[in-house]
Amino acid sequence: MPRENKFKNKGFALLELLLALGILGIIAAFAISISYSSRNIVKTNDTKKKMQKIARAAEEYYKGHGDLPAPAGTGTNEIPVGTSELNLEQTFRLDGWGSYFHYDRALDSTLTSRTDIAGITVNGKDVAGVIVSGGPDQAIDPGNLSSPYATTGDDLVLGINVAEQALAITLSDLQVLHNKAQAFDAIFAGVDNNSTGGVDEDGCIKVAGCPSSGITNDPNCGSATLDNISSFMCGYVITSTTAFIVDFYALNSAILLDPWLNEYVWGSLSGNIRYHKFFSVGPDGIPGNGDDIIL
């Protein structure tokens, strides 16, 4: 009997050992899972911080150039980190898992070299650009390789919104155009157009003394304001008042268009033809719809 009990005790100890090993295996699996999850949380937070810094750099670039930079390389969608682009360290090309970010910007359908600041959709919102990380699985969802983009699966998606910068650019452009319009108006101020001793009088037809060759209506002459000048102004062919001012003062041609790629408009705001101003028709491209931008 004592010998038999001895063998039974040995068998019970082996069972306990196997049970203990099984429990340790479960604990180890949980520990590995928790460790993996913790590492992914750290990498996710690091990736989000990188994406936010890239977006801020893109906004600053837009503020200075009126455009977003093209993706780096040929036929790729890498982050343009060069010194003449976003001026970021090379590490900003990669997310927290070491995979390349996907970067995209919208291009206007007509002016294909210019950024369409509402041409990409991210989570239902129209923006100018987007940054995408494939997340922990390091694979970007196929649907997130072109617009519309959306937060799906473990993908991390951040839109680049430059609406605030676009407004600042618009107001700056309008100030330049107004200053030049006033300077041009001053050239003809006080001119006796019909040699009757008066200045800026009604009924005048032509004025000599154009700052370049040719003769034209004086913008100070009665109702002949700057938008009502003849087809030829001082040797310039008039296609629009904005184009004339840009050409006459040799301004950068980019100032012809607002950030939504519509030409700035010169028009009456008060019903009195002598009170015209330049303005932007705003994001919807239609004057008088409530989103016009007027200095």
Image (spheres, grey):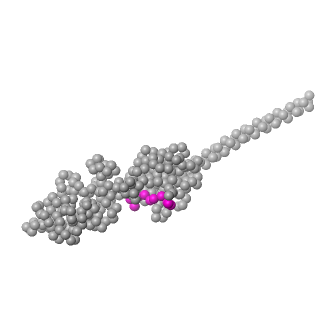
| Spot occupied by residue 54 in the image (x, y as percentages of width and height) | 48, 56
Q: Is residue 240 visible?
A: yes
Quadrant in the picture for the N terminus? top right
| Residue found 64% across the figure and 43% down from its top | 33
Name the foreground residue: 112 vs 52. Answer: 112
| Spot occupied by residue 57 in the image (x, y as percentages of width and height) | 46, 58
Name the foreground residue: 1 vs 32. Answer: 32
Name the foreground residue: 232 vs 217. Answer: 232
Give the quadrant of residue 208.
bottom left
| Spot occupied by residue 30 in the image (x, y as percentages of width and height) | 66, 41
Number of numbered discs visible in the structure rendering: 0
| Residue found 10% across the figure and 61% down from its top | 203
| Residue found 64% across the figure and 46% down from its top | 35
Residue 263 among magenta residues: no
Instruction: Spot the residue most to the top.
Output: 1
Query: Would you say 237 lies left or right of 128 here?
Result: left
Q: Is residue 171 visible?
A: no
Query: Would you say 182 lies left or right of 49 here?
Result: left
| Residue found 47% across the figure and 54% down from its top | 104
| Spot occupied by residue 171 in the image (x, y as percentages of width and height) | 32, 57
Name the foreground residue: 239 vs 29. Answer: 239
User: Would you place residue 124 above or below residue 179 in this image?
Assistant: above
- Majority secondary structure in the magenta region: loop
Quadrant in the picture for the C terminus? bottom left
Residue 73 among magenta residues: yes
- Tell me where the magenta segment starts and ends, as one range: 62-74
Give the quadrant of residue 28.
top right
Query: Would you say 153 lies left or right of 24 here?
Result: left
